[in-house]
Image: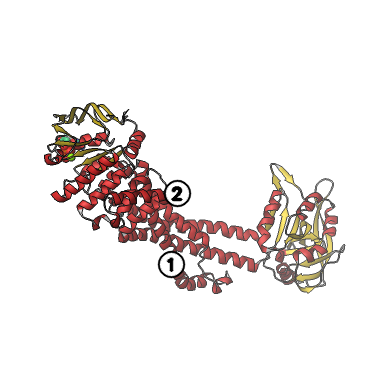
Amino acid sequence: MIARLVEYLVVSARQVTRKRMRVFLTALGIAIGVAAVVGTVSLGEGIRYQAVEAIKEQSDLTLIEATADIRGGAIQFITPAKIDELDAIPHAAASSAVVREAYATKRQTYLEVVGIDPGGIENVIRPKYLKGEPLATGSRQAVLGHDIAETLQRYEGVRLGDTIPILVRRYDENGMPVDEEVDFTLVGVLQERDDAFDQVMLIDRGVAQELRGDDTTFDGVLIRIDSPDAVFAVVDDVKTLGLTAEGAFQQIESVNRLMDVVVLILAFFAGVSLIVGALMIVNTMVMSVFERTREIGITMAIGASPGDVVHLILAECLYIGLIGGVLGDLLGVAFSGVINTFGRPFIVAQLGDTFSTFSDGDITLITPELLVIGMTIAIALSLVSGLYPALKASHLNPVTAIRTGV
Amino acid sequence: METIIETIHVNKAYNDQVTALADVNFAVGKGEFVALLGRSGSGKSTLLNILGGLDAPTSGEVHIGGRRVDFSDRKALIALRRGSIGFVFQSFNLIPALTAQENVEYPLLFNYRDRAARAKRAADLLSLVGLADRAHHYPREMSGGEQQRVAIARALVGDPLIVLADEPTGNLDSRTRDGIFELMRQVNRERETTFLLVTHERELGRRTDRTIELLDGSVVS
Ligand SMILES: Nc1ncnc2c1ncn2[C@@H]1O[C@H](COP(=O)(O)OP(=O)(O)OP(=O)(O)O)[C@@H](O)[C@H]1O
Ligand SMILES: [Mg+2]
């Protein structure tokens, strides 16, 4: 089969080289379409890449939290057994179970509370302290995230070392809420992290469980992953355990979801020009078949089946596709370079603040996959376009083709 | 003598109006060199195309090599053309994009022989027709007579039982014509390939084993 394909390609190569100019121009038609797709998609991919890089740079990507999830109608609780399973996930370097609470200050500032083992803070969250020191186990101390610390200082005058009276909501035996006032001492304030911990009050997990009156269940497990490249693998493993994963990686997921749509739309509009290229191939090959009517008739007379004729014509189209694909990829890379040169100042002006990486990176990105896709489009399109001329040729009646053909 | 072509009550009509062949009956033996004579429009090409499985008769039977040709079986017709028949046409026989050697090899491409065997066989046949030194020339670089020699080599390449030649010398001057005719005669004698040669030159007909003459679609002698 392959050997025969090669044979057809050899014969078709002769036909193609006889009409170099025509083949070149037709291939150029396809190439322009491919270049448009490669160029515009490279812009989309470039922006995607820069956005993801910016997220990686600005956020703590390797910190995720596994939380309870409802699977098939049953809640998967974070049990000690689950925690062991999470710890066993490859690349999960450290983990710490947490309880989450919502407290409020006496002046009604909402406090998002994470109860965590102080050792876990150091190993998993790995915070940098703006001021103060870590929590001590078992005591009613608090470490505040950067933003919430600022809020409390500004509106309630809370400073390091102060005792903060906090309302903890509990429920009596009749299920009625009772707010109990508990004093916490502010021992530390974290540096700005640009993630959810900026808004969080960290307290000792044992204290949180005691206030809750339940020391057996947890709300989540914070996991520190040993490498940014392993994040999505760990997330998948967490999901297979029936839990939900949250973290900065979700920003990457939403960027990818958005850019998938953007790239698809870009590719679609650029791809419209491929229709022109396809029609050029149809036209060239129909003309070529018409010009060679007698030749095709003779080919059939000397033993070619209609299938052989289809293959011979398609092999010629394959060359147009190959040439178009190579040219298209080359032009596409050039086009991408043009977009980068002239489009970058504009994009940097628009998005430079959001994505600092734009100012020193390319806004377009040519990946090997993109070039392979460009090539594949060209070849597939040439074969599809060649189908009609090829079938037309194979349906010629050899007698009339030989009698009337030129 | 073994019969290699036989037609029994072969009729061919176009659109119920034009009768191209009317009750054609004849037989050709193995190794015969037969001229098919007749005026223009008498049905010579039509008959040749039917014998080669390119066209189907309206009615009647055709037997090639002792077997009845089933004109409804497209695969069998292709096999017939590949294995038993060699065609030579009047002019512009060759594929312009291919060299002499490649043109001669071309039918074998569809017979799927291996490449080396194909090249060897094509080269042998080019020598036979005296064009070994023109193997890599394109049709446009050769004279009409040379092109017809290549076409004859191509017709022979599949080792056919029968060569059907439709006015192969029609476009040639008389000396070249004689050369081509003698070449076919020589192949016919040496290889016992059966030849059916359409011509309207009676003088050529006299130099064959036998002539069959068509008049308005019927065999008259
Ligand atoms: N496709 C067709 N439709 C209608 N009539 C046809 C068709 N093909 C051939 N004919 C008719 O059939 C008859 C025989 O034609 P054919 O080509 O066999 O003659 P010929 O003997 O080969 O003539 P020439 O010497 O000019 O080549 C002619 O009258 C021709 O007009
Ligand atoms: Mg004729």
Q: Which of marks 1 and 2 is in front?
A: 2
Asked where in the image residue A300 lies, by quadrant, the reply is top left
Q: Tell me: A108 left or right of B218.
A: right
Tell me where residue A363 appears, x and y as whole percent.
51, 68
Tell me, for residue A3, which label it has, or none.
2
CA separation in Å, label 1 and label 2 = 38 Å
Residue A379 location (% of width, % of height): 42, 54
Q: Is disc 2 placed on a helix, strand or loop? A: helix
Q: Is residue B121 above or below residue A123?
A: above
Which of the numbered marks, if any, corresponds to residue A107? none
Query: Circle 1 sits on which residue?
Result: A335
Q: Where is residue A20 in the image (x, y as percent from the top left)?
A: 32, 60
Residue A377 lies, in percent from the top left, at: 44, 55
For the N terminus of chain B, which image quadrant?
Answer: top left
Q: Which chain carries label 1?
A: A
Label 2 is placed on what type of residue? Answer: Ala
**Ligand 1 lies under 8 Å from the Cβ of mark 1:** no
- Residue type marked 1: Phe
Is residue B208 visible in the rendered image? The answer is yes
Kindly identify the residue that appears in the image at 42 percent across and 65 percent down: A331
